[in-house]
Image (tube, helix red, strand yellow):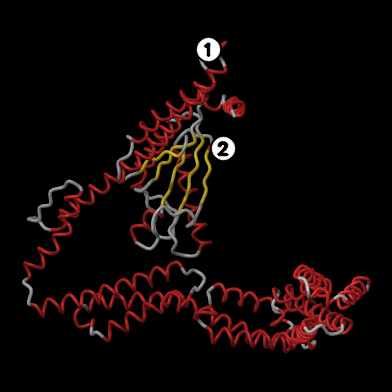
Amino acid sequence: MTRITGCLLLITLLSMGMVQMGRSGEHTGRTSEAMQSIRESLFGEVDRLRAEVEARLAQLLSPTNYRKGMEHYNRADRDFEKGKNLEDIRRRVERAISYFEKALENIELARVTLVTTLNAREDAQKADAPTFALELWQRAEKALQSAGEELEKGDVKDARKKSAQAETLYREAELEAIKMNYLADTWELLKQAEAEDVEKYAPKTFKRAQELALEAEKELMENRYDTDRPRSLAQQAQYEARHALYLAHTIKQIKKTRTELEDLILVSEEPLRRIAAALDVFAEFDRGIGIVGDQILAGVTGLQDSLVRLKQDLEEQRSEIANLEARLKELEEQLGDIAQEKSVLAQRIEAQAKIRQQFLQVEKLFSRPEAQVLREGNNVIIRLVGLNFPVGQAVIQPQYFALLKKVQQAISVFPGCSVTIEGHTDSHGSDRLNLRLSQKRAEAVKAYLLANMDLDESRVKAVGYGESRPIANNETPEGRAKNRRIDVVIHPHLPGLEATRLDIQKADEKMR
């Protein structure tokens, strides 16, 4: 009441001086500020409550209380704009607050009583159902609103009944949105292909597109929460549909112009010839396109390997430069004791040089199809590209024992090291199952290493990351194959490095 009384007094003073204020821009500005201050005093609490109930879905979960509260709020707002009696405005604001508070109580009850429906609504919203399944979404919203009205009346039984209807509609809207999101463009392309009689000219590719689209739809129906595989299938179907359209157009053009078969083959060889030339490979097609393709693939693979090595060399050089700069600063600070045989940083440089030597030793153990050896800081990563598991299993087959024998030799290069076995999968399948499968595969490799070499179990850790750390595109079979992998990470133990870590930190802090 004190705040309202103060507001009434301020309004009275303003109205008494209104003529004078109208003559001065400065006074007009002060009037506007004063009016804004009065509005904040009157509407501050109700504005906060209104924002809260709207954020908590009062329009759906307590629609009657929300509607009545808004009627009083809007009337109070209009009356204030028109400069009407403040006491009447205050009473309307208080009524609005009362209804909004009742709405909050009903929302709390709804959050407990209608929990599964609200979860279904959230899932549908994540699938963008308001965009892709608007009609179903609106029907679901209306049903939930009816459930909220019944709950306001105290009829929990009818509220749950209508809530169940809303839940069904939300789930249907969610599925429809996912299908539209992933498959609408695909079916549109297939419809276009049918209209252009593509099946006549490219029947195999067209059939493949149809099969992929149907498979994607089936996957969505059976497990709507693992959208990685259906999305990938839908994208493949779109590609095949576009491919079929292209093939049909090309074949029609060939028939129309009566192009010779020899000309077609020569035209198809030209792009490969240009790519081979860019790789400094002389393309000869007298034994077919496949030979040239293999030459190009070998050239690209060599470039990729060179790029990896260059990146690692660059990182090492940056580290060496940083060490040398730090060494220079250290020597400048230690001019009085420059004859010291080994400084902290000198030990670090020596330790890192040893790691480089050991890395090269490990790299020579593996062929390209067996493993890719990488460096990440001081850690050595053996990416076992040649180790495969049966689908959905974590059993190491005998043909991979020789490869794991080389892993044992690599670990032995680093006495006292610790090892992390990382399991990774592609994105197909549920996140939970992928995580479990990757963990089991990592543990299988750990068990094999412990059983076949003298290694303290406390120094070996197995971790499954599932699909969370891809290294390639999950949308292609080749990319998914790369993501299904075991990484053996070796953490070297180098006394020259470990013993001085604290000293290095102190030195670095001192130099800063």
Q: In the rendered view, would you say 259 is above or below 88?
A: above
Q: Which mark is residue 508?
A: none
In which quarter of the view is residue 62 placed?
Answer: bottom right
Classed neighbour count for the residue bearing mark 1: other residues with Cα under 10 Å, few (<14), some (14–19), many (≥20): few
**Residue occupying image coordinates x 41% and y 32%:** 317
Task: Judge by depth and name the residue closer to the eye, 166 or 251.
Answer: 251
First-in-chain label (1 vs 2): 1
Q: Residue furthest front?
A: 23
Q: CA distance from mark 1 to mark 2?
A: 42 Å
Q: Nearer the viewer, mark 1 or mark 2?
A: 1
Q: Is residue 241 above or below residue 468?
A: below
Quadrant in which the N terminus is drawn: bottom right
Q: In this figure, which residue is indicated by the disc labeled 2?
A: 458
**Residue type, numbered disc 2:** Ser
Q: Which residue is mark 1?
A: 338
Q: In the depicted view, which residue is nearer to us: 222 or 55?
A: 55
Vertical comparison of 355 with 450: above or below: above
> Which image quarter: residue 8?
bottom right
Quick one: SS at disc 2?
A: helix
Near-viewer residue (18 or 328): 18
Of the 4 image quadrants, the one containing the C terminus is: top right
Picture coordinates of residue 402 (x, y %)? 34, 41
Q: Position of residue 185 (x, y in %)?
A: 38, 78
Q: Nearer the viewer, residue 287 or 338?
A: 338
Left-right relation of 367 to 66: left
x 43%, y 41%: residue: 381
